[in-house]
Image (cartoon, rainbow, N blue to C red):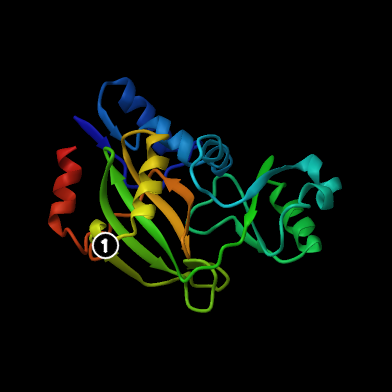
Amino acid sequence: DALFIRETTRLDHHTYRMAKRAEHEGLVVIDDPQSILRCTNKVYLHALLAARGVPAPEGLLLSRDDLANLPRKIAELEFPMVLKIPDGAFSKGVVKINSLDELRQEASRLFASSALLLLQEWLPTDFDWRVGILDGEVLFASRYYMARGHWQIYDHSRQKVRSGGFTTHPPAEVPKAVIKAALKATRLIGDGLYGVDLKQIGERVVVIEVNDNPNLDAGVEDAHLGAALYARVMDV
């Protein structure tokens, strides 16, 4: 009757091929192929959010040709910045940039595996909001805290990957601007299961990305709804 994918999705991957096959066979599919296509590309998401007026970090796209003219290209941005590959996940392929020389070095390294890169303003916060949305309705709302002594939720700088803590909240307790931005972003993607990552800096709320395959871990995202969270997923 349905295919429910619980593995990190990628385009050149069996998850995408199985989603395409299941959709062709008429099954209900989460994550559906269109959502995988749209969510796994940060470059596409950046352009989509900007075109539709969804609040997002200031930034621009870089191609290999831009390496020769970086000072002019980034004239309106300030260091530090964040440089991302289009298809990174779990904080991989995301680098903090503190200077022009560092940007040249890291961009040259990342261009070896990607034709485009996304350069955005750095927005330091103690935590990211993750709003889970299913079929156009809020399913859960969690705070994911940065790894201790690190600026990301996942710290890959050591042999063992570390991550920060979490708290899960009733959606009614989440700032309305956070919920509004998350719902607006997912309407551009589809009606599946999404995890929207957002940052809140004072009154400003920005969408960092929309994930097509958000975690649903026992004791974390289900801390508020409990077993009812899984029942809601199966009902859809």
Residue drawn at x 78%, y 52% is 75
Tell me the SS state at disc 1. Answer: helix
Residues 49 and 45: in front is: 49
Instruction: Looking at this view, name the residue that lies furthest to the right.
Output: 68
Instruction: Looking at this view, name the residue that lies furthest to the bottom.
Output: 149
Q: Is residue 174 visible?
A: yes
The image shows a total of numbered marks equal to: 1
Name the side, left or right, on which 41 lies relative to 6: right
Pinpoint residue 231: horizontal percent, then vertical percent.
14, 47
Pinpoint residue 18: horizontal percent, then vertical percent.
36, 32
Q: Is 106 located above or below residue 31 in the figure? A: below
Amino acid type assigned to the residue bearing label 1 in the image:
Glu
Label 1 belongs to which residue?
173
Q: Is 192 located above or below residue 171 in the figure? A: above
Q: Is 206 located above or below residue 62 in the figure? A: below
Pinpoint residue 35: horizontal percent, then vertical percent.
41, 35
Quadrant where the C terminus sits is top left
Residue drawn at x 81%, y 50% is 70
Q: Is residue 114 visible?
A: no
Residue drawn at x 61%, y 51% is 58
Name the side, left or right, on which 140 lies relative to 94: left
Quadrant where the N terminus sits is top left
Pinpoint residue 79: horizontal percent, then vertical percent.
71, 63
Residues 143 and 110: in front is: 143
